[in-house]
Image (cartoon, rainbow, N blue to C red):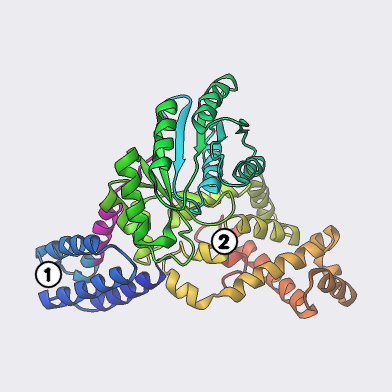
Amino acid sequence: MFDSLTDKLTELFSKLRGKGTLSEGDVTAGLREIRLALLEADVHYKVVKELTERIKARAIGEEVLGSLTPGQQVVKIVRDELTATMGGERSPLDLSRSPAVILMVGLQGSGKTTTAAKLAVQLKKEGRKPLLVAADIYRPAAVEQLETLGRDADVPVFTLAEATPPDIVARSLDWAETQLRDIVLVDTAGRLQIDDDMMAEVDEIARVANPSEILLVADAMTGQEAVNIAAAFHDRLGLTGVILTKLDGDARGGAALSIRHLSGCPVKFVGTGEKLEGLEPFHPERMADRILGMGDVLTLIEQAEQTFDQEKAEDLAQRLRKNQFTMQDFLDQMEQMQKMGPLSSIIDRLPGAAKLKTATGPEDEAEVKHSLAILRSMTLEERLNPSIIGGSRKKRIARGSGTQVRDVNRVLARFAEAKRAMKMIGGRRNKGKNPLDAMGLMQ
C-alpha cells in the first residue's frame, strides 16, 4: 500500500531538503511531481487538483520561501493537507446507546462478513459484549461462515431459520437485551452491484434497528470505484462511515485518500490482513505520516500492547535483570511478535520503511518461519539448556523442522547474539533499544 507514492514523495522531499533556499519555480516543479505521484496512486483527479492548490497557496508564501528550512516546511504543509483531505482526525464509533446497533453494508466480495467478525473482536478488546447477527440469507453458506467466525472470535451469533432479514434483526435485538449484549453487529446481504431491491431491504432493516452506525465495507483494491460505491450508498442510506478492506494488498491507496473528500463519509477502520485481529482504527494523521515515509510508531506500540502478554513481559524483564534469558524466552518473544503480523507490516510502520524494505525482503519472512519451526522442534530441555545440542540433536531438529543443519546452527548463533543484546538491554533498563534488533530480526 502506498509504496510507489511513498517512494516518489520521499525522493522529491530529499531533493527539496537538500536546497538551502527554494524559489517559486522549485515549488512549482515539486508540485508537478506531487500531482503526478498522486494520480499514479489512483487518487481521484478532483482531490488531486484541490489538494495541490491548497499546498501551492501555502508553499509559495512567506511560510516556506522565507523559512530557514524551506524543504522541511514543504513536507509539513503536505503532511497537514494530506491529513485534512483524509478527515483531519479519527472518527470514532457512536456507541452511546445500549445496545448500539451497527449495520454492515456493501457489495458482495468486499469482505463484509469477515470484517463484521473483525470488528466484533476489536470491540471485545475494548471491554464490550458484541453480538453478531446473520442477516444475509441469500449468499450460500453466508450464515455458516459467520457462525464459524463467531466461534473463532468467541462471540455469539444470532440466526433464525425461515425468516426475513428485518424479522431476524428485530428478534436479535430482543435476544441481545435478554443476554446483556451491548453491541449488535448486523451482517446484511451484499449484491454483485447496487440495486433497488438491495437498498430497499437495508432501508427496512435500518427502520427496524434504528442503528447508531451504518458502515460501508469497501474493497480498497477497486480504487476510485470504491469512492463511487460509497457515494451511492451514502445518498440512499446516510452512511456514518467506511471500512476499507485489503489495504495491505496491492491497493495503490487512492480510495483512502479520496473517499472522505468526495463522499463526505469518514474512514473509520482499515483491514490489514486475513486474521481476525487484522483491523485497525483509521487515523488520518498517522496515515499521512506513513505516506510520507515517516512511519506509524504509535499504531505499532498500540498493537504491541494488545498483543504481548503483560505477565510474560514482566517475567522476562525480571529474568533479563538476572541474565537468565533462555531459548524458550527467545521462542516466546518470536511467537508474540508473529501475532502482530508479518515482518513486512511491522517494518511498514517504522520511519524510513522504504530503506528497510530494501534491506529486507520475502526471504526474511521465510527465515522467521524457519527459525520458529526449528525452535519448536527442540525439546524443552534443549531450549532451556542449548549447550546440550550436539551433532546428533541438530540432525534430529533439522529433520523435524524440514530444514538443514546449517539452519539450526544459524538459529543457535542468532540466539547467542540475542542473549548478548538482551544482557545489554537488561543492564540499561531497556532504554533506547529496538526490540527487533534484540531479536536478531533486523540483521
Secondary element under disc 2, as helix, strand or loop, is helix
Label at residue 65: 1
Q: In which quarter of the image is residue 147?
A: top right
Label 2 or label 1, whichever lies nearer to me, is: 1
Residue drawn at the location 35% of the way across and 42% of the way down: 91
Q: Earlier in the sequence, mark 2 or mark 1?
A: 1
Q: Does the magenta stretch include residue 356?
A: no
Contact between labelled residues 1 and 2, with CB atoms less than 8 Å apart = no
Q: How many numbered circles are shown?
A: 2
Residue drawn at the location 78% of the way across and 62% of the way down: 376
Q: Is residue 83 magenta?
A: yes
Q: Position of residue 263 (x, y in %)?
A: 28, 49
Q: How crowded is mark 2: few (under 14 residues within 10 Å), some or many (20 or more)?
A: some
Residue drawn at the location 36% of the way across and 59% of the way down: 225
> Which one is nearer the viewer's eye here, 77 or 117?
117
Q: Position of residue 79 (x, y in %)?
A: 28, 60
Label at residue 435: 2
Residue drawn at the location 18% of the way across and 77% of the way down: 29
Q: Is residue 148 left or right of residue 212?
A: right
Q: Which residue lies furthest to the right in this view?
A: 392
The quadrant in which the N terminus is found is bottom left
